[in-house]
Amino acid sequence: MYSPTDRKHGPIKRKRAPGGGGAILLLAGGAAFTTLLSIFGPTIFLVEQHHSQSKDVRVGLESLSKVVRVADLKHEEIFRLTIKSCLPTQNPKCKQYIPPTSGKDEDPIQRVALVAPPGDISSILMNQLERIQHQHTNLQNKTESDIEVFATSHVPPYGYGKTHGWTKIVRLVPRALVLEVVDALQSSLLSSDSHMDLTLDDLKAALRQILRFHCRLSHVAAHTALLSIPLVDLIANSANVSRHIQDFLVSRDVGRMKGGDDDGVENADDDSGSVSATQEFYGSQMLTYIQSVAHVDVLKVLDEVLIEEMNLSRNMTVWPCLSFWAAGEREDPSKLTRFTQNIAKELSPECSDPFVSCFVPRDICEASGNGVCKGHKR
């Protein structure tokens, strides 16, 4: 991949906690008890190991009915209706800024950003983008590509191409929305943490942050080339998604790419479904544990947060979008735990990037971790 050395590129990885709450323990007692242990962690039901195996199985079966699956929120469609793309072939207002080169003999390079919250899900799409980029380079018979593809979790600052330095943006749209939320929270855990360190307030704050992330991208989609790709489409029909990506990134080569050796693109990522399933599994662990300790219907609570956030943002049309650093509870929005602070930091504009220019006060406040931003719109 062709990228400057001063930026971290590639899929946004998370730190997995070795031996944490996500470990699957293969113990006697049947599949139900094993699954239960994988959800709640090894410390909850092993205290009384002297009890009979049948009692362990009975406890496991009773608790399994309370498992929370990663699923659409009741009013999630309201969020989906706000998702937009900005395609230059359909709208001349979708600009494609190409940064100037340092030398007159250098070819201009398109900078294509996969913008996604921290987590593992984005790796599915990043693999496809890199395949298409490399194939495009091979078709040109060049050693270096005129397209730079990279992944980042930082939203672009407000303004046009010269402020964010990107030619095009690719966004992965989650299904369910909660999947992106739990993936981001999982990425905030250190090796010594587990999902049992998270609270209901963490979950609610992370949902607000993810919604505000998409609010920012909805704003930039008004003027910068942006392709939104639903996760379900990427998994169900990766070949068709690849063709859409080709049209968006390297449309002038589409005919030749289809006529050549395109196995690397058409077959895309055979692991895409398993990556998504793995994240859903970890998400179910997290949701189930939080529901068990908070004694609430966790998906119903998140749906209420979704409705509130959509009302506050007027379906993501309010400018500027609400702060990542003020995503806490209404009594004190700036009160975040270290987990949601980490997410806020990863989502905020990266004003120190040499390609980026932050001049809107909200961006400067976000980059410095100031969710109040006194004297400016919140």
Image: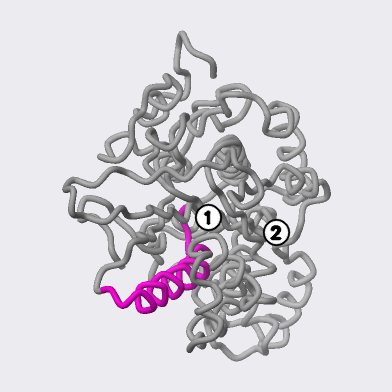
Asked if residue 139 lies in the magenta stretch, the reply is: yes
Q: Main secondary structure of the magenta part?
A: helix
**Three-letter amino acid code at disc 2?**
Ala
Tell me the magenta residue range: 118-142
Image quadrant containing the C terminus = top right
Position of 86 compared to 262: left or right? right
Q: Nearer the viewer, residue 307 or 103?
A: 103
Marking on residue 176: 2
Neighbours of disc 1 within 10 Å: few (<14), some (14-19), many (20+): many
The circle drawn on residue 170 is: 1
Image position, residue 356 (x, y; %): 33, 36
The amino acid type of the residue labelled 1 equals Val
Evaluate if marks 2 and 1 touch, with contact meaning CB atoms under 8 Å apart. Answer: no
**Cα distance, mark 2 to mark 1?**
19 Å
Which of the two discs, 2 and 1, labels the residue nearer the N terminus?
1
Query: Is residue 57 a member of the stretch shown in magenta?
Result: no
Residue found 34% across the figure and 28% down from its top: 368
Where is residue 252 drawn, in percent x and y? 50, 66
Image quarter for residue 204? top right
Considering the numbered disc 1 on the image, is that residue within a helix, a strand or a loop? strand
Instruction: Looking at the picture, tell me which residue is in the foreground, 167 or 302.
Output: 167
Q: Is residue 365 above or below residue 97?
A: above
Residue 4 lies left or right of residue 22; in this view the side is: left
Which sits in the foreground, 270 or 292? 270
